[in-house]
Amino acid sequence: MNRREFLVGAGSLAIAAKPLFAAAQTSSRSAIFPASVRADFPSVLKETYLNSASMHPVGTFAAEAIKKVVDYRLLGAGNGADFNARAQEDLKAKFGAMINAKATEIAYTANTTDGENIVVMGLELAKQKGSNIVIDELHFTSSLYMYKELEKKGVQLRIVKHKNWAIDPEDMAKAIDKNTRLVSMAMVSNVNGFMHDVKAVTSIAHARGAHVFADIIQAVGAVPVDVKALGIDFASSGTYKWLMGERGIGFLYVREDLQGTVLPTTRYGHRQVSNFNRAQLTWEPMPGAARYETGGIPVIMAAAVNAGIDYVNKCGLTNIRMHAQQLTDRLQKELPPLGYKPLTPIDTQTPIVAFEVKDAAATTKMLQAGHVAGTVIANENRIRLAVSVFNTHEDIDRAVAVLGGKTSSIL
């Protein structure tokens, strides 16, 4: 099964809710979403925002959810609504449904990197002499840094290089052997939106006795994620990108049969136990992945992502992908003639595209002057643009004009 076939087939697994916004397909520039969607993100009315891979704009739905919790905390019972223990458990189930996992396979974390640290430290990779870790150079900065630090402690680190800004599963296969303990990858790379052939990599890893961690922050809410079908053992994600939440809370997925055995608890806190008896110092362990949690979670942020997931489900992942593809296809077609070398494989099915720039400082000035938000990585001469549900063809018109040096004519 190729990547396109997988995305079509897995969409129904990732988002079960029937979308409320119907897709329109009358032309290549027809709107997938009604104007009301753009109105749900007020900040994007002030600039052309193509930077959701960095930080998704806050939606009115998330703001309303936050306000309900604040009103409850500020004004007391009878005002707003607390995001209580029941709501927190329901949110685990809701996120789990997005990735085809049980609620008991989901733990709360602070962010994506926090989740990856729980996995890496629980596996005690630094103590496994003679073992190796396999990653690739399109992984996230924090991951590359973490594994390089582990290398200093004696772990053999193998970094697979990209070929034309994609990672070939065959190159991953050459790096993975019987001594590989962990393969770690970003399912969708923040560098350029490249999406791994995850199933191919996990099949290789499992055949050779390795486990697989996936950073899914740039994937979940943007493309189908089915951890069971893809063979992912561990995964983590923040919530402030395609889940349309906010910073400060994330999720960790740990496959049920690996909990407490392959991945033991390394941190301790009251969220791991119930029926605590202070006099006798007895308690009952909480079931499932709660064993990886410690103290209280930021309930205001939890309320925000809860509303964000509801909004993604309402839009429908199939519609989200159709919408993004229209816009990224245009960027892939219209920016190269202006001198921007594409750094994203042409068949990439994600909302992120990247291009090489000749002068990062000049590109930054053009974006600022044209009121276009994107990410310019100066030391790598790279620009990254990302589209979301609120973006329109007019946004692409403006971005192309601005990057083509026509800023003054469109102001």
Image (cartoon, rainbow, N blue to C red):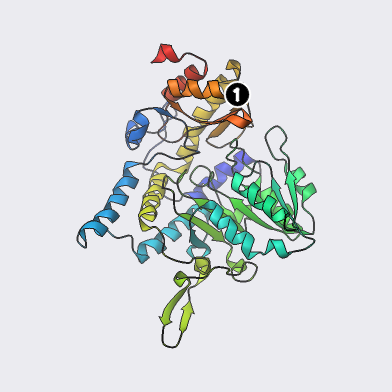
Q: Is residue 18 something that shows in the picture?
A: no
Residue 82 locus on image (x, y percent): 29, 60
List the single residue furthest toward the top: 409
Residue 251 locus on image (x, y percent): 49, 56
- Marker count (numbered): 1
Image quadrant assignment for residue 180: bottom right
- Report crowding for label 1: few under 14, some 14 to 19, many 20 or more residues within 10 A (C-alpha): many
Between 66 and 74, the one nearer to me in the picture: 74
Between 108 and 149, the one nearer to me in the picture: 149
Image quadrant assignment for residue 138: top right
Q: The residue tagged with tag 1: helix, strand or loop?
A: loop
Vertical placement of 273 versus 4: above or below? below
List the single residue furthest toward the bottom: 280
Amino acid under label 1?
Answer: Val
Kindly identify the residue that appears in the image at 48 percent across and 40 percent down: 318
Kindly identify the residue that appears in the image at 52 percent across and 35 percent down: 351
Q: Is residue 328 something that shows in the picture?
A: yes
Left or right: where does residue 235 sit relative to residue 282? Answer: right
Pointer 1: what residue?
Answer: 357
Residue 96 locus on image (x, y percent): 49, 57
Residue 24 locus on image (x, y percent): 41, 31
Question: Quadrant location of the N terminus?
Answer: top right
Kindly identify the residue that appears in the image at 49 percent across and 30 percent down: 374
Between 71 and 32, the one nearer to me in the picture: 71
